[in-house]
Amino acid sequence: MGREFVEIFDEWVETYDDSVSGKDEEYQAVFAGYDTILDEVASLAKGRTVEFGTGTGNLTEKLLVRGLDVLGIEPNGAMRARTQERFPQLDLADGDFMEFPLDGKPVDTFVSTYAFHHLTDDEKAKAAALYGSLLQQGGQVVFADTIFKDEEAKFAQWKKVEEQGYHNLLEDLKREYYTTVPVMEKLFTDAGFAVTFKQLNEYAWLIHAIKA
């Protein structure tokens, strides 16, 4: 994950919560039902839980409320500081999807929302393989992120967004590594997981992978 991407969040930290709450019209559909999406991810987590991309701590809060043992991983210093301010006792570390410190405790669940698309498909496959090597049978990956049913659906969405005049969103959809359900299914299956998908809004899907 490039430092240029990480530094973008230095500015976004002040407006991030406004974006995910739907105040930015251009991204309303992307974050529709945001709180419910976080609830769904949190409800599936169990045991020692590693959260990638804590952001400002919105999912973190729901995990902690459920009494889970959480290790937060966040590459951006400003976001990390915001989360630590909200939850002073939280175990929080600098890292990303592929490079992160562990304290020797076995991990039961990896969670993340709206972040896995920052990895290329090859990087996603390597990450899935890493999680598979760290989890015991029954351990799980619970991610929610923007993906598409297939390539046809992806290009149809690009066209729709362009017609809506949402140029920033279109640029984002083309710049980031938003993948498809078949690609995601293959990379997790190859890593030894049984994986299911559930569409949560027009953009976001729940990816629930259980170590076989």
Image (spheres, grey):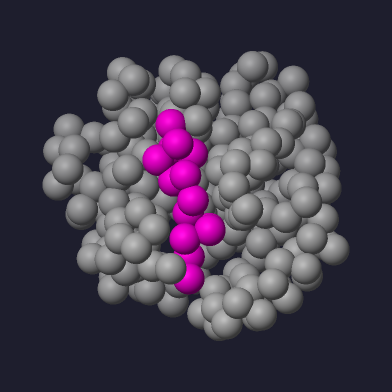
* Percent position of residue 29, x then y: 53, 58
* Percent position of residue 68, x then y: 35, 21
- Identify the image quadrant of residue 23: bottom left
- Identify the image quadrant of residue 76: bottom left
Please state which of residues 74 and 112 is positioned toward the viewer in this rendering: 112
| In the image, residue 6 above or below residue 112 | below
| Residue 143 visible to the viewer | yes
* Percent position of residue 163, x then y: 66, 80
- Identify the image quadrant of residue 206: top right
| Residue 130 visible to the viewer | no
* Percent position of residue 51, x then y: 43, 39
**Which residue shows up at 73% across the image and 55% down it?**
148
Please state which of residues 117 and 170 is positioned toward the viewer in this rendering: 170
Instruction: Confirm whether the magenta stretch covers residue 2.
Output: no
Please state which of residues 163 and 90 is positioned toward the viewer in this rendering: 163
In the rendered image, the quadrant that contains the C terminus is top right
Furthest residue to the front? 164
Task: Specify the segment rendered in magenta.
Answer: 26-39
Instruction: Confirm whether the magenta stretch covers residue 27.
Output: yes
**Which residue shows up at 17% across the image and 33% down it?**
89
Count of numbered circles in the view: 0
**Which residue shows up at 63% across the image and 44% down it?**
205
| In the image, residue 140 above or below residue 85 | above
**Which residue shows up at 38% across the image and 73% down it?**
8
